[in-house]
Structure formats: structure tokens, C-alpha cells
Image (cartoon, grey):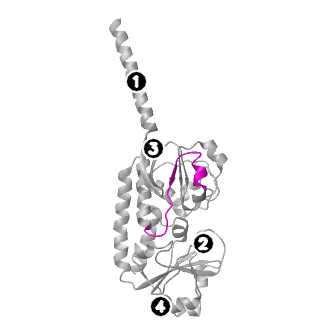
Amino acid sequence: MQGLWTRRQTLAGLGLALTLSWSAAQAADVTVKDSRGEVSLPLQPKTVVVYDLGALDIIQSLGGAVHGVPNQALPPLLAAYKDQTKYPHIGSLFEPDYEKLKALKPDLIIAGNRTLPKIAELSKFAPVLDVTVGDGDQLTQIYRNIRAISTIYGVPQKGEAEIKTIESEIAAVKAKAQQQGSGLMLMTNGGKMSVYGPGSRFDMLYTVFGVQPVKDKIEVSKHGQAVSFEYLLKTNPDWLLVLDRDAAIGREGASARKLLDNKLVHATKAWRNQHIIYLNAANWYLLSNAGPGALRENLKQLSDAFGR
């Protein structure tokens, strides 16, 4: 009997040790880099809510779980997250719903550019991973976010695989772009036009994807430099890369195609050579190239256009 009792005590102790070990593993933290620097965050958190579409793209690419998303018109790439029974709304990108957050009790909140002013308030509910991507050296920041999220989800090797694929596809597009002459990023919005050059929010087009900018110095501004049709003819780029903001946010308005169908634009090299690319508006504007899915789709569109 004494031996049997001893064995039972040993097994009970082992079970308790395993339980404690499992609890410790679940409660473990991991150090990653976000826009603020190094941060300590939960490893493999049980309940994650996301206020950034680029981060949502990253998580989807990694096969990770999400438990709350913003009440936002989602691009086709993220259509799976439209099901509110699986993915409850947690407020907008600009105005979080704090009552919903309180009810969900998240272990981790992921937020970025559009939610930046609310991050201090969000941090009262759970640790926050800040995936904000600023202008300039954007790809480095995107890779930082991929590595941080894949590490938190416990799949760092998947993150590195995504980065390796992106690097390969960028190199292929860059090789084509460098043979195409100059290009100009143009956004249309409510019948108005603005252009963006190196150093802007669309800097990646030039410094990463290899499109040669026009010689004119373009003002770096959040809303771009307002221009006229005469400006397009004056700078006369070999390629026009057009982002229709109205289409990106699902708003009715003068479409970019109709807006650019006029005599001045017809006189440009881009129009005459059929070198106008109507970019995937949602991927460029809403997702800002900030996730693997958007990057791959955008790179394919450019590769196909430059390869014609």
C-alpha cells in the first residue's frame, strides 16, 4: 500500500508540474520590434483583435486566428473577415468601440496608422502591437511587422518564408521597371487629381519597385501635390500609375478612367502608348502594400503591365 500511495503521489505531482508548465507556456511573453522599438508581448495569445488592415493581411497569410476586426469596408483580399458571426466588429479604424473591447477581453491588440491617436487608450485594455508604417523605408517597416506578428503567433519560419517570396517578386518587377522610362503616381479623388513622388506615402513605387520618377520635384504631403491636366502633359511620363480613391473607399464619384479621358491626357506619352495602369485601389490605399497578400497582387499587376 505504501508503494502504491507513493506512486500516486508521484503521478499527481507530475500532473501538477505539467499543468503549471503548460500555464507558464501560455502566459509567456516574447520580445519583438514594432514602430515604438522593442516591446514585450504575449506569445500565442488566445484572443487577438486587429485595427489595421495590413496586419490583418499578414495574419491571414500566416494562417493565424483573429477575434475582432474594424467596422470597415474590406477589400476583396480580406473578404473572409466580413462574417460578423466569426469576426465581431470592434469599432472603426478611427474610433474603437471600448465596450466591445471590454467584453472580448483581448490578450493582444494590433493597431497602426489610422488608429495611432487611440493607441494609448487601447493599451488600457491589453498590450498593443503598433504596426504603424511611416513614409520612407517602408519595406523595412513592413518586414518588421511580418516578423513581429509571425513571432507572436509562434510561426517565425512562415514569416521569413513570406519575406523571401516578396523579395524574389520585387527583384523581378524591379528588373522590368528599370527598362520602362519614367512613371508618375496619380491619385484621383472626387474629380480632383494629386501626384506623389519619392518620399511620399507611395514611396515604395519608386524606391522599392524601381519605377523611375519624373524629373519634376513633387511636394511631399499626406494628400499629395494637387495638379492639373496641363501638369500631366508638361511632365509627360512614360507611365501613369493611377489610384482611384473613390473606388478604394466604395464611394460613388467621377471614375479615374472618365476623368483622364480628355485631349490633354490623350497627348501624353503614357496615353499614346497605352501605358496607363489603373492600380488595385483597395490594395494601394486601404492596405497600403503593408501585407504579403497585397504586395503579391500589386507586384503581379505591375509585372504583367511592364511585361506586355
- Amino acid carrying mark 4 in the image: Lys
Q: CA distance from mark 4 to mark 2?
A: 25 Å
- Give amino acid for label 3: Gln
Q: Nearer the viewer, mark 3 or mark 2?
A: 3
Q: Which amino acid type corresponds to the residue marked 2 in the rendered image?
A: Ala
Magenta-drawn stretch contains 193: no
Q: Which mark sits nearer the N-terminus, 3 or 2? A: 3
Query: Magenta stretch?
Result: 118-137
Residue 235 against residue 39 in the figure, above or below = below
Seen at 35% across and 12% down, the residue is 6
In front: 156, or 281?
156
Instruction: Give percent across and percent down for residue 39.
Output: 45, 50
> How far is mark 3 from mark 1, CA to CA?
23 Å
Disc 4/disc 3 C-alpha distance (Å): 52 Å
Q: Residue at (55%, 66%) from the top-left corner?
A: 286
* Residue under label 4: 269
Of pointers 3 and 1, the one earlier in the residue sequence: 1
175 up-or-down from 34: above or below: below
Can you say whether 86 is above or below 25 in the image? below
Residue 44, disc: 3
